[in-house]
Structure formats: structure tokens, C-alpha cells
Image: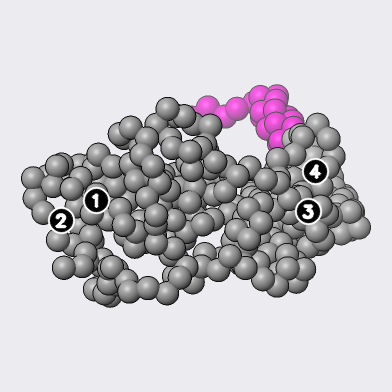
Amino acid sequence: MRVASPCICSTIFNRVTRKASMQLRLTRSIFMSLCCLGSIVVLVAPVSLTSAAEASVDNATRPVDFAVQKNIPQKHDALRHSERDRVLQSIKKKHPNFKQQESLASNFSAEEPILLLLEKRPSNKKQNSPRLADAYYYDYKTNETIHCIVNPETGVIIEELRTVELQLPLVKEEIERAFTIYLQSSHRNELADAYREATGQSLIDVSSLHFKAFILHGSANMKRLNAATKRCGRSRCAKLLIHTEENIALNITPIIDLSKGQVIQGNTERSADRAIPAVNANSPQEPVHRHEQTNGSEQHALPH
């Protein structure tokens, strides 16, 4: 058995000691680095929390855009229900007899101007103008269109204009009234003839018919209009279009003067006829049709 010499043992011991010392220094360096990094984190964290707190305080003291927060309508938004109500209430306060909503045609009164249209007034995007509303009424007593310009935020009526020969589209109440006036006139027999001509059958119940109506101005289609119809525009006139449930159009388009409550021309599809004396829809008379409530809908029946 050979024994290592003292020199070799000393060399091995020095190498092991040197290696251990290097590992110790490395471990110490890593430890110091971690300690430094921890100090940085500890120092940065309070700064971050302070910045967040300062930002929170800054946001609390910064001016708030209440238009966005309260969802206030912007300049070009359509009128809201609350604004519409405010506009109508302001007009009602000034004109108690103005109708604020549609009613049945049977409740018509020339003493009560009817609401034709309520909408936001168009505004110039380049100008910083306030939101305004346009409300249009028709006064059957004077045959004038009344235009009210109102601030929807405050309800202040800024301007009120009255204009003749300005005819806006008909509303539902007027369309129904036009058809009722036609059924109560002496032209009703022409309706039965037109129905038989279009379908080959007899007209038993008017509820089988559908109708539409459009505003008519006397300057339109002058060749087919009689003298009374040519004056439409100065008064409010409706042109009726009548068709069956199968969408078959009847060859008859009567003209009704809503201002007078009369049929002033029985049919514009043929040569201009003279105005046959009509029954005034506003005067008491025996009705030529009956209204029966059937599942919530009205039925009209021709007299026997």
C-alpha cells in the first residue's frame, strides 16, 4: 500500500479550500444582490402607492363632464320623451285648447288645433346653437299651420308663426275622419260600384276595405280636378286611396275637404266632376254606417 506524500496532500487541500472559498464568495455575492433588489422593491412600492393615491386625488378634483355623466342629450340627438313632454306642456300652458295627442275622429272639433308634427329642429353642426324643437299644429278654424319653436330643456317658447297654404302630411286622426266623411256622403254609392267593378262581387261590409289618405294641394294634377278641389291648399284636403283585403285597388279616389267636412270631388280617376252637395260630417244626421267593436277593431257596414 502506497501512502501519498505530504506535498500532494497539501496541494489537494489548497485546491479544495480555494474552491470552497470561491463558492462562499459567490454565495455571498448572490445574497448581497438579492438584498439590494429587495431594497429597490421596498423603495419603489411606496412610490407607486403614492403615485396611485395622488392620481386618485387628482381625478377627484378634476372637472367632471356632466353632459356624459348625466347622459344629457347632445346637440344633434333626437328629442327624448322628457323633452317632448316639456315642449307639449309649455304649449298647452299657453294654448289650453291645443290638442297634445291624437284622438278619435269622432271627437274632432274645429276649436281645437291638432298636433301634426313634433321633432328636433335641424341645427348647423358648425355653429354652437342650442337644441330646439319644432311643433306644428293645424288650426281648422282659421286654416293656418301654427309653428312653435321651443327650447326643450327649459320649455321656453321662442317663437310662434302662423302660415297659410302650408300643408303637412295627414295624421291618423285626419285619415280616419276623411274616410268617415266619405261614407257619410252621397258618394257612397260610387264606392259600391267601384268595388263590384274591381272584384265582381257586391260590397256588403266596409270593414273588408282598407284605405289610405294623402294631403292634396290644388296645384297638383290640375286637369283632373274640379273648381272646388283646385282651391285645396288654402283649406286642408285629403285624397283617399281605397283597396280590398286582397290588395286590389278600387278605381276611385275621392277628395275630402277636411276644413269643410265635405266630399268635394267623388273621383279624380275620371274626368273632373262637379262637386255634388255633400253631407256635412259635423252636423247631426242618421249615420250610414255603424261601428261595432269586434276584438278591438271597428267594423263599418253599409246601410240596407
Residue denoted by label 3: 160
At label 3, the amino acid type is Glu
Q: Are marks 1 and 3 in contact (CB under 8 Å)?
A: no
What's the amino acid at mark 1?
Leu
Q: CA distance from mark 4 to mark 3?
A: 77 Å
Residue placed under numbered mark 2 in the picture: 203
Mark 1: which secondary structure? helix
Of callouts 3 and 2, the N-terminal one: 3
Mark 1 / mark 3, whichever is N-terminal: 3
- Mark drawn on residue 37: 4
192 left or right of 235 in image: left
Question: How far across and down, in percent of the image, does residue 157 sit?
Answer: 80, 58
Q: Amino acid at mark 4?
A: Leu
Task: Tell whether label 2 touches label 3 (CB within 8 Å).
Answer: no
Task: From this view, report whether residue 244 is shown above or below residue 288.
Answer: above
Please name which of the two marks, 4 or 1, marks the residue nearer to the observer. Answer: 1
Q: Is residue 140 left or right of residue 228?
A: right
Asked whether disc 1 touches disc 2, contact meaning CB atoms under 8 Å apart, the reply is: yes
Q: Quadrant of the C terminus?
A: bottom left
Of residues 58 and 53, which is closer to you in this image? 58
Q: Percent x, y for residue 171?
A: 49, 54
Q: Is residue 28 visible?
A: no
Q: Secondary structure at mark 3?
A: strand
Is 21 magenta? The answer is yes
